[in-house]
Image (spheres, grey):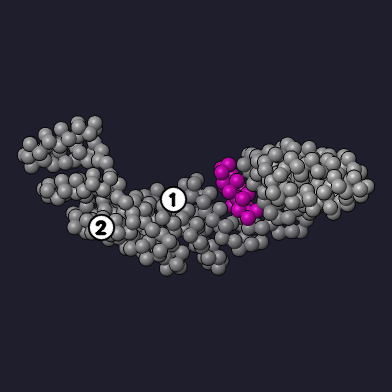
Amino acid sequence: LLGEMKAAGITPTIVTFGSLIRKLCELNFTNKALQIFHQMIDMKVKPDAFLYTVVIGHLCKINKLDLAASYFEQMVQSGCLPDKVTYTVLVHSLFKACKWEQGHQIFEEMLSKGHSPELVTYATVVNGYCKAGRIDQALSLMRRLKGTGRSPSGSLYSTLIDGLCKHDRHEEARELFEMAAGDVQDVIVYTSFISGLCKAGKLDEAKAVHVKMIEAGCAPDPVSYNVIIYSLCKDNRVSEAKELMDQAMERKCMPGVPVCTVLVDGLCKSRRVEEACVILERMLEAGDRAPSVVTYSAVIDGLCKADRLDDAYIVLQKMRRAGCVPDVVTYTAIIDAFCKVGRLDEARELFQRMHERGCASDVVAYNILIRGYCRAAKVDEAIAMIEEMAGRGI
């Protein structure tokens, strides 16, 4: 069509070229789009800021950042002034690709040209500075933003708080957190600071901030509970973790499966298996918190260690009905418990069923059964297990 127009002596307008180039970019016909773009320039039709931005944005989208930067330079040299959208597209893409220095230069140029970046752009730049270890630069940018009379977003505060904590600058993170409390009531800000404190082992301070969040009327979300409950469990402060879990469940804000599992495991190891069973039931009731094989295995192991073998077997059956496939660890816990109380026939039957269900036994499972037979003076059975084990190449 362009050829026909040219043959007829008709010069396409920028609107015609723009529509065609934009559509080619949408269809990912990059080379063709660039060919038409240069053909347009050859025909003395000057691209405007919008069209340059379309091309630059597309090149950024397909991760051809060096080429995008060259078109940006061409744009400036041609006398076409980049607008706020052009700068924003390039800044976001450069920082996303960890090209900190180029991104920094374009961002500073954007500010020097009088453009006012959106808060999300500030957050992107601050995040990039933090990842690059340029924390002071990130703090300086935050101060510059505040100096314009604009309030940083919760996302911006949380990004910088997280960066400060990761670089062990917790006092500055606290100061920024206190500053944020005057601007926003955002669960993400609280969670970032709580997470930083937890990772630094400052669990009492993290708990205090959690209480402060609730008192300020900022409702915790599952992520905020995840962070602190997980950290308390890892520090063997299971009772405190359980209190927070109870609070979370009362607020219908149940943490995710990994955190529930860590707490279930901690409770079982503390001989509080009944409480672990309650959490397992609540996970099943929640619908979107389906227990994992690790969760079930922890409960089954806890019940076995509490000499509640029949209950453990019931949980194993419930696990299967829920569509969660037991692994060798799950089976081994019950087999071991059966052997210790002399229920060798049931142990052997479960061992056999494990194989029938496609779960290969390991050396641990075999050794448990062999030990059980030896303790019961059933030498022939023990020898048979050793031979079977050797036959399987274990």
In this rendering, position of residue 276 left or right of residue 45: left
In this view, 184 is above or below 156: below
Tell me what residue is drawn at x 73 percent, y 36 percent.
Answer: 66
In this view, the residue in front, 209 or 270, is 270
- Whether 392 is among the magenta residues is no
Residue shown at the point (82%, 49%) measured from the top left? 1
304 horizontally vs 57: left or right: left
SS class, disc 1: helix
List the residue tagged with mark 1. 231
- Label 2 environment density (alpha carbons within 10 Å; few <14, some 14–19, many ≥20): few
Which of the 4 image quarters holds residue 259? bottom left
Residue 391: quadrant of the picture? top left
Lateral position of residue 188 relative to residue 91, left or right: left
> Residue 370 or 24: which is nearer the viewer?
24
- Between 89 and 305, the residue placed more toward the observer is 89
Q: CA distance from mark 1 to mark 2?
A: 32 Å
Q: Amino acid at mark 2?
A: Gln
Q: Quick one: label 1, few (<14), some, or many (20+) residues within 10 Å?
A: many
> Magenta segment, which residues?
155-176
Specify the principal SS of the magenta part: helix
| Disc ID at residue 317 | 2
* Left or right of 338 on screen, residue 358: right
Q: Position of residue 73 (x, y in %)?
A: 82, 39
Q: Residue at x 43, y 61 (%)?
A: 288
Look at 26% across and 51% down and name the residue there.
301
Q: Earlier in the sequence, mark 1 or mark 2?
A: 1
State the image coordinates of residue 42 (x, y, percent, origin top left).
Answer: 88, 40
Secondary element type, mark 2:
helix
Q: Amino acid at mark 1?
A: Ser
**Residue 273 appears in view:** no
The x, y position of residue 208, in whole percent, is: 49, 58
